[in-house]
Image (cartoon, grey):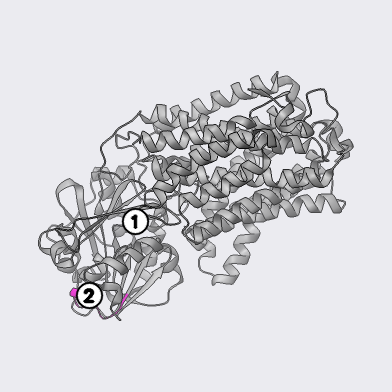
Amino acid sequence: MTDITADSAPFASGPGSQAGMGETAVSDDKPAVVRRLILAAFTMLFVELALIRWLGANVVHLSYFSNFVLLGSFLGIGAGFLISRKSWSIWPFSLPLLVVLVIAVVKFPVSIERTGSDIIYFTSLRVYGPPAWLALPLVFVTVAAIVAGPAELVGRCFAKLTPLTAYRWDLIGSLAGILTFTALSFLHAPSIVWGLMAVVPYLVLTDPKRRMISVAWCVALLIPLAQESLRDDTHWSPYYKVETTSNPGMPGFMEIRANGVPHQLMAPAEWKIEQGERIYEMPYNRLPVDDLDNVLIIGAGSGSDVAIALANGAKSIDAVDIDPVIMELGAAHNIDRPYDDPRVTRHVDDGRAFLQNTDKKYDLVLFALPDSLTLVSGASQIRLESFLFTDEALQSVRRVLTEDGAFAMYNYYREDWLIDRLAGTAAKAFGHAPCVDTFADRQAVISIARQEGSQSCGEAWSRSASAEEVGTVTDDAPFLYFRGEGFPPLYAITLLGILVVTVLTVRVLGGPLREMRPYADLFFMGAAFLLLETKNIATFALLFGTTWFVNALVFAGVLIVVLAAVETERRFRTPPLKVVFAAIAVALAAAWVIKPEWLLTLSFWPRLVAGTVLAFLPIYLANIAFAKRFRESSNSQSAFALNLIGTIVGGCLEYLALFSGYNNLLVATLLLYGLAFWLVPRGAARTA
């Protein structure tokens, strides 16, 4: 480590310093402190989001474990605040560690090993690099150390301002980081742009005496990102790093990889039917398709399924895919030119959201290999397609079919139990057994007509012992690829390691845990808040789709609501803590009773208003309680650090949803807030 005198002496406050002592904190130059605080908070959030996206795109399978990167960021932020009380600094090491991480990932690519059938991960790549139990902790610790740097600067600024004033500007800087990254996602900006946006604040925040060294580190960071970004075969969508490979000797063929995993093969429709996989032809052999006036294809991707539907006589096709870049590749390069056909309308949207919002009736609905390779966000276990395969989703499919309509889904399902689960879901929604055709490598087509007599099955599907065992999935627990037989060992080992590292970090940097006892309630508030945020991400993904834009709105909305709570506490006299906690309990109970799926029947604007009130009212009230306690803290750095450490525990508890469902996370949240209220120091409870 290094002494802080060169890099951040104007903002230093050692353990014995009076800076940061509740409302008595002062600064000789508050505008300069505020500017530095905003820029450091921006850097902290922007780097966190960039690491989640970039590591998920370049470490194969890490996109399935982005929650671990998020938890590493939380640990780094908490550690940074604890370090900000010390006479040494980790800030000078943040940028070099970021460079080392990027170069290591580029030069020594890793495919995390995933074997077994407890949870399915879509891939056909060979395994190389360290196993998941080693790779994930390494990523976790490295990310924590990187993020701790800007977090330390934020903490030192906290020591120069009153707690709520510091928190206010921290939120504004964080919100700017989220909005900037969202804008770059909208523009499909490559990783070199992310790097440029990160290195500029690093240079501004660095002490002038060390700026030339930092410039060298910035160049070292930008070179590999530029090499990655300037390749003609690499594109960045809001979800994936999309790479393409074409063979000049095979015109019309293009392999599309997403986050390093083979995702789609763009090929002539005729080849796919005659020489390719049989899954593409089976829906038209099993179902009544004599008159295809309207067809809906979810997972249309690069357009091969659309071309096949056109070849089978479809008169009008709604082609839906969540990824705009993959659709654009299909429009530009598919040799059959399906997206140029006037009978085809493209929709960049979440499939479940499109089903929920359309009033159109279809003769055929196809789920065309809609398997994502990433999670909706770091703070949930929902994949992009999770809500497509629930009981409620298949009921929505039945609703949009004509009386003689039919539905089919096909994919490489990897496990027999997954085929049985999906066939059972179709049977439950339609009231009779579907046709199930299986091929090599567990390829399968599940086809079902609205009228049982209209389908022509080769061999009728019957519910097996496996289907009874795994059951179907619901909107409340949309974990299609989780068999449900015990907690996944990989998750258990990794989460245990995260908790051990967290405890050790707090003990080493924060001193004896008993000295932090006055802020124990803030710890449990942090854990409860992360669970509440996770539940809200799941709710909004169901109500409005799993698109990146909805996800960004949720994160930005959370920060805006938190900021509103802070401003309320700063400007107005609010009720006592016991009243606020009682209101939190009522709001959580209301959110638990009113199921999100009930709101799906509402039109968009009423659904938006109701969903926003149910999701954000508990967050607002919870942050009123937090602000009341935080403003009275005698050491804002320790108080904020312990609150952030609590979010790591909440992130681990999030995995309870695999068994309890998302709605019951509200029960755990209520218990945590109850424990927080019980631990509020008596003096603080009277004065707040």
Query: In the shown orientation, is residue 502 left or right of residue 401?
Result: right
Residue at x 31%, y 68% (from the top left corner): 332
- Please determine whether, in this image, residue 34 is positioned above or below residue 98: below
Identify the disc placed on residue 508: none
Give the residues in magenta.
310-317
Tell me whether the residue at label 1 lies in contact with that at label 2, contact meaning CB atoms closer than 8 angstroms: no
Q: Is residue 279 magenta?
A: no
| Residue 672 visible from this viewpoint | no
Relative height, residue 86 to residue 360 (above, below): above
Report how far apart the C-alphas of labels 1 and 2 lie in the structure.
Answer: 31 Å
Q: Position of residue 82 (x, y in %)?
A: 69, 28
Task: Identify the mark at residue 310; answer none if there is no mark.
Answer: 2
Magenta part, dominant SS: loop
At a point 68% along the width and 49% down the height, the residue shown is: 173
- List x then y, in percent, for residue 459: 13, 57
Split into 4 quadrants, where in the image is the C terminus?
top right
Does residue 497 appear to the left or right of 317 in the view shown? right
Where's the N terminus, which quadrant? top right
Residue 41 appears in the figure: yes
Of labels 1 and 2, the one closer to you: 1
On screen, residue 266 above or below 127: below
Task: Please tell me which residue is depicted at 37% across the width and 41% down the height of the picture.
Answer: 61
User: Horizontally, is 449 left or right of 194 in the view?
Assistant: left
In depth, the one of 261 and 447 nearer the eye is 261
Q: Secondary structure at mark 1?
A: loop
Q: Quick one: label 1, few (<14), some, or many (20+) residues within 10 Å?
A: few
Is 314 one of the magenta-colored residues? yes
Give the amino acid type for the residue marked by disc 1 in the picture: Asp
Mark 1 or 2, nearer chain start: 1
The spot of residue 34 in percent (x, y) is 77, 46
Which residue is under mark 1?
A: 232
